Amino acid sequence: MCSWVFGFAAYPEECLGRIMLQYFRGTAMRPLKVLHTADWHLGLVSWKSHREIDRLEEQRECLEKLIQVAKDERVDLVLHAGDLFHQYYHPPREAIQLAAEVVVELAEVAPFVWLIGNHDWYAVEALRRMFPKSITVIRDMEPRSFPELGVTIFPIPYLPLSRFLADHPGETVQAMVRDRLRRTMEEWKHSFNPRHFHVLLGHLTVEELAFYAEANASREVFLKKADFPHGFSYGALGHLHGYTVLETPFPLCYPSSLVPENFKNPDQKGGFVLVELVFGERPRIHPVFFESSALLSIDLERPLGVLEVRRLIEERLRNGRRNYVRLRIPGEMLSPEWFTELVRLRGERFEVVVVEAVWDEEDHQESEQAPFDIAALPELFARFAEEEGLSEDVVRLFEVYYHRAFEEDRE
Ligand SMILES: [Mn+2]
């Protein structure tokens, strides 16, 4: 270092610039390889109302692959963008055990950062002190700097709107929280380090994508693409399942969950992403998909024997080792006997998990009406009570129960 400084004056200016650039590139500002994952939902049991399937073994297979890739690729950092568990209170013991094993093993490969999502088990707070130092659990919005990696993480954990309802009337709370988040992100710029990558880590909904998820604007904050300020290197998101990248103003990425779980989006594949951050360049995002399971939705237009249905399913099987099948059948065609036969159907690589009756156009339109606004319930009840001549006490009692139920639901 000394000789370099003393030799300073000997270099012409242009040459010096090149040397300094090399110095930054070669040492402090080296590229960073990040493994970004989210929405593991360990302990998930799918299709409870039809045929219950515990997904833990599939999830274990997915995580084995994820760990292998983390090791093979020698990643510098592992980011978990929330929902490691599926149940936010008493997840199954096997899920806790798997979570602990996997997190500790990954933390041996690289620092592991876990942002708390809406499904996450809050008792993990107590475990935090028992985790190795290379595990960081985040449930606040304080930036975390990793000087040895040259990266600063800017976290937005899941923000339920109910937390702000005490101070703000229901209809303004969404705009208010959104505004507060925008200001926080602007303030974060003071923590920007010109020699660091700035990674946003969030468990949240980007409004432009909300249509195909079960995100709910009356419960949680929605951010628009335009709400994110410039200056971040990469946005590591979680909460919406299914691999998605939004390109502006910097890449915002949802890496998908571990296993596909929802027939509303049968093309969803489980996976995670590897992200290469290089100074002065757009991040390179490489999705990695799991083959442990796939969803298959089949419409039956006429009554078929069970053997024929089996053949039809087997013709359409996907690559996944386990194919979970939904059969959709016109309601007037579906007899109870046929239903019972179909719902038991399984083969070596498939299992029927949902048999759904589909009703004709008219009924269908009715079910696709605008969703009922639950916030309007107390007012509706008050009107009903007035017409029926019920006392005001009844109306007030209804309101009390309504708000209590609402709160419990949000908790
Ligand atoms: Mn979530």
Image (cartoon, rainbow, N blue to C red):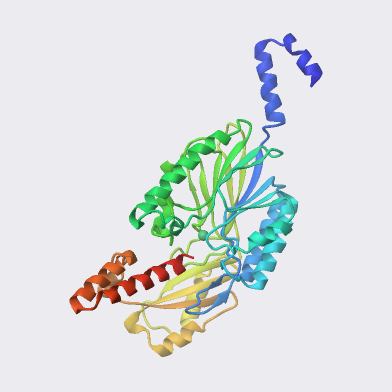
- At horizontal 35% and vertical 52% (from top left) the residue drawn is 172
Q: Is residue 184 visible?
A: yes
- Report x, y in % for residue 268: 50, 61
- Report x, y in % for residue 90: 60, 71
Tell me: residue 340, above or below residue 222: below
Tell me: residue 124, above or below residue 6: below
Left or right of 294? Residue 164 is left
- At horizontal 58% and vertical 45% (from top left) the residue drawn is 142
Q: Is residue 360 visible?
A: no
Residue pushed farthest bottom?
Answer: 337
Query: Where is residue 297, by image quadrant?
Result: bottom left
- Report x, y in % for residue 47: 50, 75
Residue pushed farthest right?
Answer: 3
- At horizontal 43% and vertical 53% (from top left) the residue drawn is 221
Q: Nearer the viewer, residue 97 or 292?
A: 97
- Report x, y in % for residue 256: 54, 57
Quadrant for the N terminus in the image: top right
Query: How many marks are shown on the rendered structure?
Result: 0
Q: Nearer the viewer, residue 394 or 262?
A: 394
